[in-house]
Image (cartoon, helix red, strand yellow):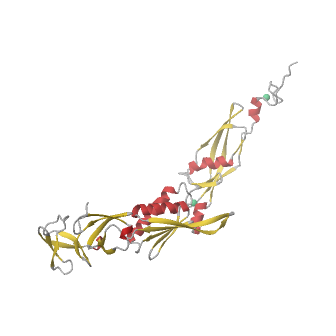
Amino acid sequence: MTSHLFCPKCGRASEGGLCTQCLIKHFNLIEYPSILELEICPTCEACFAGGRWTKYQDYADAVTPTIMSQLNIHPDANDVRIALKPPLSDGRTSKIHVRVDAVVQGMGVFKEFDVEVRIKKRACDRCCRIARGYYEGIVQVRASGRILTEMERHASEKIAHMVIKQIQDISRNAFISDIKHLKEGMDIYVGAIRAGRQISKAIIDKFGGSFSEASKLVGNRDGKNVYRISFAVRIPKLMPGDIISLKDRAIQITGSRKKVTGMDLRTGARFISDAKSLKGVKLLCHESDAEETILTMVQDDEIQILDPDSYKPMILPKPPFLKAESGDEILVVKTGEGVFVLPEKKG
Ligand SMILES: [Zn+2]
Ligand SMILES: [Zn+2]
């Protein structure tokens, strides 16, 4: 004898228990709170969704994950799709229309409802840390054997902000909590070690030099040791534009990294050397110390100029790179080892 099973609700034949139609009819696809909360940081507009803060392009992008995390969808539902209409467009409380589509036992089911979304302002983890002056790394920018110049300070600061901008989306702790200017250099405090390392790299990419890392145990958080890392960035002593004295040569530096390049101001010859072998070299001046003066006479191997301070004529050997003619203005530097004509700047 064959046994026939019937749906207890409608009496139709079924495999046992409710038939698919009745199952779908009584299936509770979704449970949701009467009010959904959307937490937004008032400072940076990051949204708290799914247990963490994320920065979205706008509210509409934030609403979906936030609502997803607060809806309770039946575990037997497959291929769940959620559509929201209209997405929130401002920071006020508003009603949102939700439609959830899913597949249950091979049948498509859906539920539509309106739900109130309440915007709550709360400072995010990142903004709280910035406000507290939190930091994990210090980038200490110094120059070897001299004080960091204004230009180098300015450029390092700009580099630091640029690096942060590039990585802040992937590293939420990538922020600058403070910049301290000291007599000899500057300290950049950053919220993430990774940011400190990238900033250090970018600074030596620009100026040459090197950096080293040192870590210091500063405490314990959730059973884990917390370290702070200091990045000692050393910019080379020689800078482009420096004029140095080297075995009775006067060299104008054009590049200063591992290799130092320049030009001999007497012969016009190209100069190249290892940075290491130039340690302790004598610095005469910088090209920004140059003064303008008049070229009064040009001969085969001599020129006459007016001393820029006393206006007295003086004779110099003619540098091979000199293109100016008598009557032109030229740039000269007066150093302890003589007066030198500088080549014209290109561009
Ligand atoms: Zn039934
Ligand atoms: Zn924030």
Q: Return the x and y of residue 264 as percentages of the image width and height.
A: 25, 67
* In the image: residue 53, left or right of residue 284: right
Q: Is residue 196 above or below residue 65?
A: below
Which corner quadrant of the figure contains ligand 1? top right
Could you tell me which residue is drawn at 48 percent across and 58 percent down? Answer: 165
Q: Position of residue 278 (x, y in %)?
A: 36, 70
- Left/right placement of residue 80 relative to residue 192 reads right
Q: Give the x, y percent position of residue 341.
A: 22, 70
22 to 304, vertically: above or below: above
Displayed quadrant of residue 334? bottom left
Query: Would residue 282 appear left or right of 63 to someone viewing this image?
Result: left
Query: Which of the two residues, 103 or 296, is positioned nearer the viewer here?
Result: 296
Residue at 62% from the left image edge and 46% from the top image edge: 96
Which residue is at the far bottom?
310
| Residue positioned 80% across, 27% down in the render | 15
Q: Looking at the rendering, in which quadrant would you find the N terminus?
A: top right
Tell which of 87 and 212 is nearer to you.
212
Locate residue 43 relative to residue 329 in the image: left or right: right
